[in-house]
Image (tube, rainbow, N blue to C red):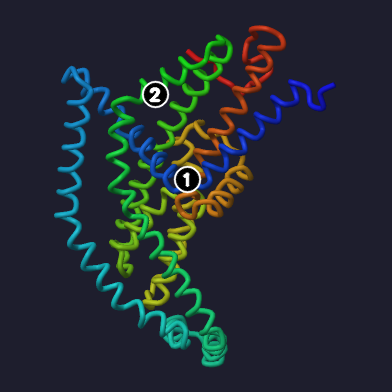
Amino acid sequence: MAIIDTRTSRIIFTVLLFALGLGFLYVARKTLVSFLFAVFFAYLMDPAVSRLEKVLHGRGRAIAVIYLLLLIALSLFFFSVGPRIGRETARFGKALPDLLNRLSSGEIVHDIGREHGWSLQTQDRFREVLSNHSDDINKYAEYFGLRAANVAKEAWIILLVPLLAIFFLKDGQTFSNVALSTIQSRPQREFLQAVLTDLNQMLAQFIRAQLILAALSLVVYISFMGAIGAPYALVLGTAGGVMEFIPVVGPLVAGLIIMGVALLASFPHWGVLLIFLIAWRLIQDYVVSPRVMGKSMELHPLAAIFGVMAGGEIAGVLGVYLSIPVMASLRIVWRRTRIYIEKRRFGPLNEYAFDSEVRPRK
């Protein structure tokens, strides 16, 4: 008599194969991240390529024209705005050590106290607190500097992603067709096709929404900070717009950096700046983002927070950015799996009968 029957052996083999796949993905996570960003970039470019393809009667020619226009646009941007950003960044870099020294020594307390009428006793109390924690302040500053340097090391992805995206733009539909052709069972093929369709819609809407939100934040940050005369408005506004790409953590870090620099530089209207940051965050999260993002994510806040924390542990800043679309993708697979199981159990049913969130494919 066999110790393990055929069904049990198949289950064990499937579990081991799944574990091996997860292990491979973890080991190759940096390479996988590059390909995922290439997929996102392809989704961003696909609408323009598809429209131009009808005019030029060739997808390869359409991709070449779109990339040429993108290169021209980036060149114009860097030649017009780049020098100003470079000068302001250099000025900020030179001033940063002095600003941190004023913070760790407590000298900044007297500047803020004089501007806001604090008593000498209050100023001395705050200065003593900062002086006692000067080592901790320097340690955290060094830590964030190292983290920023590590992020800068990943800049090569910026050059690699557009090159990889060319293949996804050109042969993306072929990849989907090949994946579908490997499945012989009709129900399983319908399941995979439904998953791919939902993923396509979700990722396309997510990438375009993120770009719109980041561009809007960049314009609003630079405009408001420039209007009130905030220090380093161009650099900090650009950083705030870029950090909008990182879910949950990015806007919070951007706000802390902007306020920290304003306080270190003794900006007199820091209260106005704080009110603006809070108000803009509320507008962005509860007014703009729901309308731009639509229902493409449909994630519970706890699921989003878990995804962000887990993504940060696995792949750092890149993992944080990818956490939301990955969690949304898992939700799509789970939802479609429920539909597939119900159909196998009860036959073809209306999807609304047991899952009101599911939208039938058109």
Please give left or right for residue 224 compared with residue 5 in the image: left
Secondary structure of the residue carrying tag 1 is loop
Q: Which of the pair 117/178 is nearer the observer?
A: 178
Q: Which of the pair 322/116 is nearer the observer?
A: 322
Q: What amino acid does circle 2 point to?
A: Phe
Instruction: Name the residue located 44 percent from the left edge and 58 percent from the top edge.
Output: 277
Instruction: Name the residue located 47 percent from the left edge and 30 percent from the top edge.
Output: 202
Could you say where residue 241 lies in the image, as x and y percent from the top left? 36, 53
Residue 134 showing in the rendered view: yes
Identify the residue at the far right of this view.
Answer: 1
Q: Is residue 236 above or below residue 36?
A: below
Residue marked by disc 2: 175
Of labels 1 and 2, the one closer to you:
1
Q: Which of the pair 286/131 is nearer the observer?
A: 131
Q: Residues within 10 Å of mark 1 (few under 14, many from 20)?
A: few
Secondary structure of the residue carrying tag 2 is helix
Which dot marks residue 219? none
Residue 272 showing in the rendered view: no
Q: What amino acid does circle 1 point to?
A: Ala
Residue marked by disc 1: 28
Q: Is residue 3 above or below residue 194?
A: below
Could you say where residue 79 lies in the image, as x and y percent from the top left? 14, 54
